[in-house]
Amino acid sequence: MADWFQRTKKGLLGAEKKVIPDGLWVKCPGCSEYLYKRELDKNYWVCTHCRYHFRIACDSYIHMLVGKEYEEFGQELQSNDPLKFKDSKKYADRLKLAMSQTGSNEAVKTVSGRIDDVPAVLCVMDFNFVGGSMGSVVGEKIARATDKAREMKVPLIIISQSGGARMQEGIYSLMQMAKTSAKLARFHEEGGLFISILTDPTAGGTTASFAMLGDLIISEPGAFIGFAGPRVIKQTIGHELPEGFQHAELLLEKGFIDIISPRSELKQLISKLLHFFYEKQ
């Protein structure tokens, strides 16, 4: 490891300059420490110095909870451009770029699998796909996943990582708030168990619909959770906001969420909850 920090280039006045190879180290946004990527990956992308939780891809959550033995469904669904939306770039072009960068057709993956020995249906959002925004296909996939969990009589788990409703689809995206909420209400009436897991960020229409409707609401440490941004709220009410406003720790204190779980303990926690509540059904 010491070889990586050897002086390999000449700096000013002939002094040698330290060079850190690209791609091996990451600077932590929480404490500014440089972290070795390989060790960070082993630690679930959680800083070993300050416990800052980096954002991770949806596939990482799926593998962490159900391993590699799962069945994905709904991947044939794909967004179109109902409003022919265009700002600095065509919406259709944004979708193509997101698909090529993530390898997914949408901002949520829906799978069925087993957490330890308990069957479950999972919806896992991906912030890398247009900010994890909720468009018509995201809403439809979550609605279908809820129906599947209801028909199979198994728990439903939704992991949110989203900037909110997708503005490029206008009213079509806003309608998904009502659709997903109605599906979850029916699921609840029939005795289904819904666990909502909030990660950074969970915002906008996602927060205002399915993300906060869980029978149990779990958050990762330090996650931003809110509807409008703090600057908008501050300007609207004309008052300073409390420290930690719209972050998991304050929301736990105020009773909006049930528990904060470090990522390394998430599977163990979910497994315990499923064994307790699912076996009681």
Image: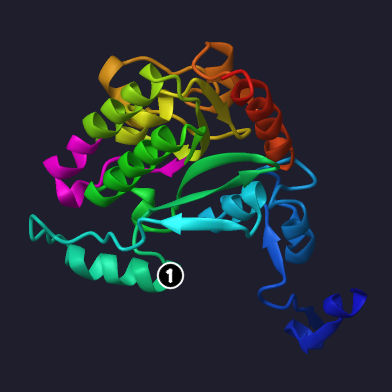
Residue at (68, 37) in percent of width and height: 266
- What secondary structure is marked by label 1? loop
Above or below for 195 versus 85:
above
Disc 1: CA contacts within 10 A as few (<14), some (14-19) or many (>=20): few
Residue 180, position as x, y percentages in the image: 29, 33
* Residue that badge 1 annotates: 103
Give above or below for 180 relative to 126: above
The image shows residue 82 at horizontal and vertical percentages of 10, 56
User: What's the amino acid at mark 1?
Assistant: Gly
Quadrant position of residue 204: top left
Q: Write down the region rendered in magenta.
A: 160-176
Q: How is the image coloured?
A: rainbow
Observer-nearest of 246 and 278? 278
Q: Nearer the viewer, residue 148 or 51?
A: 148
Q: Nearer the viewer, residue 148 or 56?
A: 148
Q: Give me the residue at 12% from left, 61% from top.
A: 86
Residue 270 falls left or right of residue 265: left
